[in-house]
Amino acid sequence: MRATLAAALAVALATVPAAAGARANPDATLAKRGLDRAVQVGALAAEGADAYRAEVDRAVSVLRNLGGARETNLRGVLHDVAVQWRAYSASRALTLFSMLAENTTYFGNRAAPVAGTDAADQDGIVYRFFPGHGFQFHPLANAGALNSAVAAKDVDRAGTLATALLARASVGPGGALRWEYEFPYGGGKPPWTSGMAQAVMAQAFARTFTLTDDPGDTETARGAFRAIPSTLVRQLPSGPWIRLYSFDRAAVLNAQLQSAISIGDYATATGDPDAAALASGLQSSAEALLPRFDTGYWSLYQLGGGESPLEYHLYVVSLLKKLAQRNPTDPAWAAAAARFELYTTQPPLLRAGPAPPTTYPRPADGFRDAAPVSFWLSKVSRVTLAAGGRSTTLTLGRGNHTLTWSPGPLRPGSYPARLTAVDLAKNSASLDLPAIAVAWDTKAPAVDAAVAGRTLEWKAQDEGTPWLDLRVLLSQGSTHRQLRLGHRPLAGKIALRLPAGAWRGVLVATNSAGKTARVDLGTLAGA
């Protein structure tokens, strides 16, 4: 089973000197405790554990000289290694401490890269950068790298990578081989697996046999497939659906299509009837649910979820084309491929909603200070609303939306408005909108009011305010009283608690802009 790789790595790591007088690091302490435990239970040989301890010390030593993103990411990797201290099997320890070694070397000499950057070690093992977690062992990327080596007919590269990958596989019941992700992601705790990665790994090892002629590669492919049916497939009414993540039940389209293709290739190469049946079921289930991933303008990433990023939409198009080639008697695949590809050239559609009411930005009182512009959008796009030389831009998905346009220092007037949408494939469309009216709230409200008995009834006209602050001023000779009624709607009635006697009443109504109207209520009689 190519176990010599682990021993070779242990010898190499043993040459790394431990940091003298290293400060206590909680994650380093935990990782070393895990190594001691693994030796005690027979999961690791003592010399291998010693090499891994030296690598922990090297990481701690390098951390002392780092700062910023380099330190954050190397600490993140050390933490990811430490949290699994109770489960250091030979394969998992090799995966974790090799990953730590790669990160220590990288961040000791280079700045943190952009998310998604890949790095490969001397054996071709691929590590992908995730901010905060550094470069992580990435099973799907490694399966892809093995497939690429086979496609290039590079026997040495394929054989070396296959050997390194086999050494990192966790062995489960029935000889199932799992390649694990060793960091938390999307709510999942490590170690977790991916049905898609397992499918592509089975495909890649089955293909590797055609280069190496090593029966062990076929057996490894069988082990990769064995891990799929029991835990990495869920049943939907339409049929089986691959679990992209072992901890998640989302039905992801690209994962389903790729897994159907990869498991089908594995089944053809090995003659595995169970794999052939699963590949057929995955394909049929995908075909049945394909309309639910089609918005008519773009694809959905997962069932009932949001739209696909451009790279995944294009990936789905390529997978649909492959399925069309493999199923020439089923026109559904070719039709779907053509339709999804057409979406990458069609501009987005925009439909205007109702014209916004007049905007009253001055004074800024929290009411109609800006214009809400509503519209419908066909697919995920970068949308810009522009009027009067002022604009606002947001990335929005399909559906109904409202963008808020602020007139800022613009003077009262009518400002033609325009919506522009640019989709993920850079197709653009524009829509002229009704002009946006801007006014300043400089007038007092027009108020009618009267008192019948002791009930005050009022009605005001004032588009620029949502409420009135009402007071009733009472005077009786030199005596004055005031009834505070507080914030009230523009129309209504309320019983007044009038003091005894006859009073002259005046209603004072102040709008949200601070403008005041006064209404003579005449003589009011209290009890």
Image: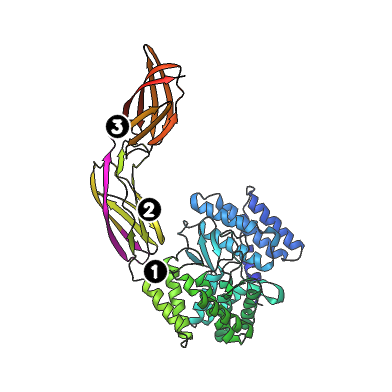
Quadrant of the rendered image containing residue 321? bottom left
Q: Nearer the viewer, residue 139 or 501?
A: 501
Residue 342, position as x, y percentages in the image: 36, 74
In the image, residue 451 sits, relative to residue 224, either above or below, namely: above
In percent of the image, x 65 and y 62: which residue is there? 51
277 vs 71: above or below: below
C-alpha distance separating marks 1 and 3 = 50 Å
Q: Is residue 128 above or below residue 67?
A: below
- Discs 3/2, front: 3
Q: Secondary structure at mark 1?
A: loop
Give whichever of 519, 367 is nearer the camera. Answer: 519
Q: Nearer the viewer, residue 388 or 475?
A: 475
Q: Locate residue 137: give its quadrant.
A: bottom right
- Image x and y of residue 183, in percent: 59, 60
Whole-percent x and y of residue 246? 61, 67
**Total number of numbered labels?**
3
Q: Residue at x 67, y 75 (%)?
A: 176
| Label 2 or label 1, whichever comes before in sequence order | 1
Circle 3 sits in a helix, a strand or a loop, which is it? loop
Which residue in the protein does label 1 denote? 297
Residue span colored magenta: 420-444
Q: Amino acid at mark 3?
A: Ala
Q: How many other residues sit within 10 Å of disc 1, few (<14), some (14-19) or many (≥20)? A: many
Type of residue at label 1?
A: Tyr
Q: Is residue 124 visible?
A: no
The residue under label 3 is 444
Q: Earlier in the sequence, mark 3 or mark 2?
A: 2
Q: Quadrant of the N terminus?
A: bottom right
Residue marked by disc 2: 402
- Amino acid bearing label 2: Thr
